[in-house]
Image (spheres, rainbow, N blue to C red):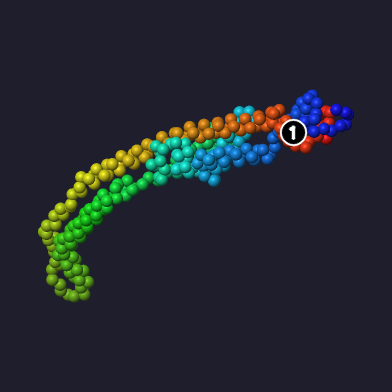
């Protein structure tokens, strides 16, 4: 290679190729902002593939320093996530919960800087009890409440009837007091009467709820308890999964960065582009 001559990388002497590779690495050409954006997008796509929704965000710091790693946050599409991860045991509670992963530490970004939130919205009896049974229970409850209202109304009427003489006496006293001091003579002030002794109506014969109603309620209670236990276990499993996913992305990120800093990758870039170099290994 003559002094001042510029050649393509593949045409350089071996010792100049080595210097060109080192110059390329020293000037930081192995990684730039475009690569950083690409790696972030790659992480986000991988998170979407396993069930994260489009609102997923991702951050990373991969400089082999304490506190470095990968963190992310977003909502999970649980039906898709359970299918992708094979967590079919949790499918029955998917309609009643939502899951968000949040980055709670904005100073560091790693596997331990995220929190899993499992939000529960459990179904009512109408969803946990068979429809036909629930409708029968509703009809029974409506009839029981009708009897209760009728009994309360009957009791109220008796109480009012008992107090009728007292109400009449109060009206007489009101009129008596209005005339006192106006007329020279008034009859003796009437005495307050006792309430009438009228018996209260008996309690109605409420229809007994069939035993199947009690059984259905107990099964619904047990089913809800199972749902709650599964939600608690799911939160534990998701915390472990988030840690593993963070470490997996971190490992992949380091491998990508290291590969782009390798001789193999640099040679591939330099050979596939029309760069030319002088005898010192610098680009012309």
Q: Residue at x 55, y 43 (%)?
A: 56
The picture places residue 70, in percent across and down from the top left corner, at 58, 34
The picture places residue 34, in percent across and down from the top left corner, at 68, 40
The residue at the far front in this view is: 11
Q: Residue at x 15, y 74 (%)?
A: 185
* Residue behind mark 1: 271
Mark 1 surroundings within 10 Å by alpha-carbon count, few (fewer than 14), some (14 through 19), many (20 or more): some
The picture places residue 261, in percent across and down from the top left corner, at 69, 30
> Residue 1's quadrant in the figure?
top right
The picture places residue 246, in percent across and down from the top left corner, at 55, 33
Disc tally is 1
* Residue 118 visible to an observer of this rendering: yes
Q: Is residue 158 above or below residue 53?
A: below
Q: Residue at x 53, y 34 (%)?
A: 245
Image side of residue 211 versus residue 254, left or right: left
Image side of residue 136 versus residue 88, left or right: left
Q: Residue at x 75, y 28 (%)?
A: 22
Pick whichever, 127 or 144, lies toward us.
127
């Amino acid at each position: 290679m003559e002094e001042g001559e510029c050649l393509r990388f593949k045409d350089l002497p071996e010792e100049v190729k080595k210097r060109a590779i080192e110059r390329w690495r020293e000037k930081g050409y192995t990684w730039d902002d475009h690569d950083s954006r690409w790696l972030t997008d790659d992480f986000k796509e991988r998170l979407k593939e396993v069930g994260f929704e489009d609102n997923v965000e991702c951050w990373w710091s991969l400089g082999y320093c304490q506190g470095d790693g990968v963190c992310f946050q977003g909502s999970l599409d649980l039906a898709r996530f359970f299918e992708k991860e094979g967590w079919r045991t949790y499918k029955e509670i998917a309609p009643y919960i939502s899951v968000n992963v949040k980055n709670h530490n904005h100073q560091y970004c790693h596997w331990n800087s995220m929190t899993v939130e499992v939000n529960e919205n459990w179904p009512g009896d109408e969803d946990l009890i068979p429809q036909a049974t629930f409708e029968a229970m509703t009809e029974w409850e409506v009839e029981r409440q009708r009897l209760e209202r009728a009994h309360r109304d009957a009791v109220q009427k008796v109480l009012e009837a008992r107090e009728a003489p007292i109400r009449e006496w109060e009206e007489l006293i009101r009129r008596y007091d209005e005339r006192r001091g106006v007329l020279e003579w008034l009859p003796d002030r009437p005495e307050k009467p006792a309430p009438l002794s009228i018996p209260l109506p008996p309690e109605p014969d409420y229809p007994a709820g069939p035993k199947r109603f009690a059984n259905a309620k107990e099964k619904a209670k047990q089913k809800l308890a199972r749902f709650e236990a599964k939600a608690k276990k799911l939160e534990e499993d998701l915390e472990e999964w988030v840690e593993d996913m963070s470490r997996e992305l971190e490992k992949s990120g380091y491998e990508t960065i290291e590969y782009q800093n390798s001789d193999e990758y640099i040679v591939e870039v330099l050979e596939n582009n029309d760069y030319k170099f002088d005898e010192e290994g610098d680009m012309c």
